[in-house]
Amino acid sequence: MAGILVSGLAWKRFGAYRPFPSKEPYLEGDPAVTSPGEEARTPLPDLPHWEDAPDDLPGAIRQVKRALRERIAASGRSVEEVFAVVERAVEAEVADIAAARGRGEEVWPVVDHADIEAGTVPDATVRALRRRGCLVVRGHFPREQALAWDRDIVGYTERNGFLEAYRGPGDDFFGSVGSRPEIYPIYWSPAQMRARQSDRTARVQEFLNARWKHESEGVRWFDPGRDSLYPDRIRRRPPGTDSGGLGAHLDPGTLDLWMTASYQRAFRHLFDGTVERYDPWDAAHRTDGPQYPGTTMCSAFRTFQGWTALSDMDRDQGVLHTVPIPGAMAYLMLRPLLPDVPDDDMCGVTVNQVFPVSERWHPPLMEALTGIPDVRAGDSVWWHCDMVHSVAPVTGQKGWGNVMYIPAAPWCPRNERYAEAVRDAFATGSSPSDFPDEHYERAWPDRFREADLNATGRRGLGLAPA
Ligand SMILES: [Fe+2]
């Protein structure tokens, strides 16, 4: 790629980034945080951590669970007590969601793109977004634009013989949904890139990023005004499809959520007796650490996952559901520490497989699974990166079910690192390194090129202005 890289300079210009603040008070035996008037407590025991996936997974699980239990106990509270705090909070949200449904109200907050552009999103909607952790943006793109992009993608794949060349699913998880591709491993169509680099998308991402605390402890954890254009795939599900959907799961990580130093810091309040201070909107320590590799991994830090609809989709046509409770992550992180879970089991979480959420271990969460409202082509759908989600099954789907996956992945050390791999994949038309090595587009002459990037696109890929 011909562009001059500016990545690396950006953080120096911000001047505030420190990946591991030297006065980090939470781990490595430092005293726990004290509130005003609170006595400084004795140091809590260290946690073992593995910056690469451990070879002996059951052994490491046993070791980290014992250490987490001991750390919580040393804070003066029991695991059961801490979990009960989280369980009560989650159950109150589940009841609120059920009550809203009972009143016939939409659980998913909905906002018009025009209000985001004009800065006139009602306060009540902003509060609902923080509470539910998810959002539908109506008219993110004009419907005709989205439908035109849908046709463009068909033309792009047909001209290049994609269906003839298709070799079957390259990843076990999404591969489970059917034989013909539902998920197209296509990353570099002009339609996708135009949507990723559009001003309209940038405004939505900025609005969503602003829900997060991105500065604390003297660190700017991410830049809310700059997205890293995380390239992901498209889904095209034709009329008449029978699909088993996707089970409830979450995507931010697997065993690394408990086992790496940075995630242990990110979730510090769950393990140091200050569970009431856990804030799912705090980006501290989330934007630099490593992730254990796997076919379902996401190297980027995403504030929100999202997709943009390229067809109209009714709510009963096998659509996305979430557990609209961002704080439920605390439940998922603490549940394996209860005594009814075997010592070498993290409620089924392991490396190289998606993080499962189940009736067996997480029954109240499953009650809250709530589908999106009807959407039209051009609407976009967003959910907090830690939130449980699933795709409902459908039989004989009415109409198309087409989306482009475009998240909010703001510029931060982790995304800056990944941007290097993205630039290589973009330059060569390859599948990005987070995804299976399928590389269908390498020889496709009409993929999106560097000359087609606008200023937002260049900035997102870490390229100097043209
Ligand atoms: Fe997912």
Image (cartoon, helix red, strand yellow):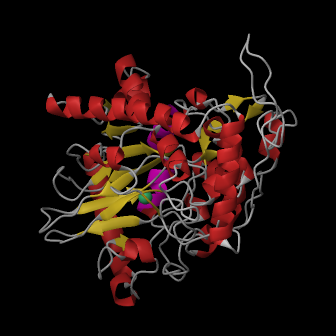
Q: Residue at position x 44%, y 77% from top?
A: 172
Overall secondary structure of the magenta section: helix
Would you say 373 lies left or right of 293 here?
A: left
Q: Nearer the viewer, residue 213 or 363?
A: 363
Q: Position of residue 364 (x, y in %)?
A: 33, 44
Q: Residue at position x 40%, y 56% from top?
A: 357
Q: Residue at position x 24%, y 61% from top?
A: 401
Residue 466 visible, this orientation: no
Quarter assignment of residue 200? top left
Q: Residue at position x 77%, y 17% from top?
A: 39
Quarter placement of the N terminus = bottom right
Is residue 455 one of those drawn in magenta?
no
Image height of 162 relative to 250, above or below: below
Would you say 94 lies left or right of 249 here?
A: left
User: Ligand 1 appears in which quadrant?
Assistant: bottom left
Highlighted range, magenta: 191-207
